[in-house]
Image (cartoon, grey):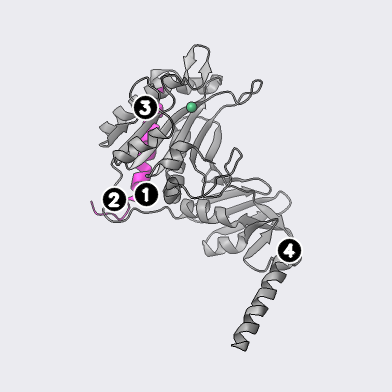
Amino acid sequence: MLWLTRRLWLLAVCGLVLATAAPASLVRSDFISLRGRMYVDAGKWAERQKLVPRWNSGAGELRLTNRWARLGFKADTARVEFDGTLVWLSAPMTKLAGQPLLPVRDVDHILGPLLNPPRLTGADKVKVIALSAGHGGKDPGNIEGNRKEKDYTLKLALEVERQLKRAGFEVVQVRDRDRYLAPEERPNIANRRKADLYLALHYNGRPTAHGSAQGLETYCLTRANGESTNGGQSRGYMPGNRRDRENLTLAYQLHRSLLGAFNFADRGVRHANFAELRLAEMPAVLIEGGFMDSREDALRIYSDQARGKFATAVVDGVLAYKRLVERGQPE
Ligand SMILES: [Zn+2]
């Protein structure tokens, strides 16, 4: 008993030393606590993932590659390019004693599912897709000239529905006409109808009165108590967090498919605490399909032809996701 107590006491002292020692001395360990955040030594993690690291200390650039994947990180940014597609981590890669460190929670929640996509269990299939056309009724969404976001999200949702059905899916149209639905009501409709996926469709507006932006953003739910890409923190574990790995995989596949179809500026797979994503019981994403005031993005938003192509890319992204998560499932 005395031995055990002494051992516990020693462990406690060691823990204290680990927590307070000069950070450089901890680099030999896999996990490093720095400024209140846990990091993992990127080289050691890469080795376990069978990724070959190339670290350019001067430029602060880390590349990890194997036969299947290419990852590119830049020190002091939260950006990772996964096979050329931008995904936002919740915290930047950092350096300690000249060596790169990755945030542990992002390794688990973001890099993990990208490298090892989840699989459905049992006889689960991706069959019923819920589409949620953003805004509606008294809520026009973004307005650009005489164009209202709510009209174009509905046109897109109807076109995606047409093409999904042609590809053999069933569709739950959360909003099929010009009416108002609170953001919290929307996922509940999909939950009641037992949809397998939830896609919210939006277009962006100008971010500030003066500035403008362009490009594609695809959002999945911020993990429990995690940081959102556009600022803010999520509090607690939400129903949507049960699907964190699938959410990320679905967002990545859709984002990648849309980038392949259009020459969009890549604003990345992002994390946000949107009510629609919080309350969905199935894997859920929200697509911001370009900025309504951007000349370049307008070419992808307003014409029937561009909308048809956009919808095809959404269906291709769903099919890519379905193939990944159903691999190994009985036909
Ligand atoms: Zn919107």
Assess whether residue 13 is covered by the magenta stretch. no
The image shows residue 211 at horizontal and vertical percentages of 65, 23
- State the residue position of label 2: 124
- State the residue position of label 1: 324
- State the residue position of label 3: 157
* Alpha-carbon span between mark 3 and mark 1: 24 Å
* Alpha-carbon span between mark 1 and mark 2: 13 Å
Secondary structure of the residue carrying tag 2 is loop
Assess whether residue 330 is covered by the magenta stretch. yes
Q: Earlier in the sequence, mark 2 or mark 4?
A: 4
Residue neighbourhood size for the residue with mark 4, other residues' Cα within 10 Å, grouped as few (<14), some (14–19), many (≥20): some
Residue neighbourhood size for the residue with mark 2, other residues' Cα within 10 Å, grouped as few (<14), some (14–19), many (≥20): few
Secondary structure of the residue carrying tag 1 is helix
* Alpha-carbon span between mark 4 and mark 3: 52 Å
Can you name the residue that lies furthest to the top here? Answer: 146
Q: Does residue 118 show up?
A: yes
Secondary structure of the residue carrying tag 4 is helix
**Ligand 1 within 8 angstroms of badge 3 C-beta:** no
Which of labels 4 and 1 is toward the front?
A: 4
State the extent of the magenta-drawn residues as a range: 307-331
Foreground pick, 176 / 121:
176
- State the residue position of label 4: 23
How many numbered markers are drawn?
A: 4
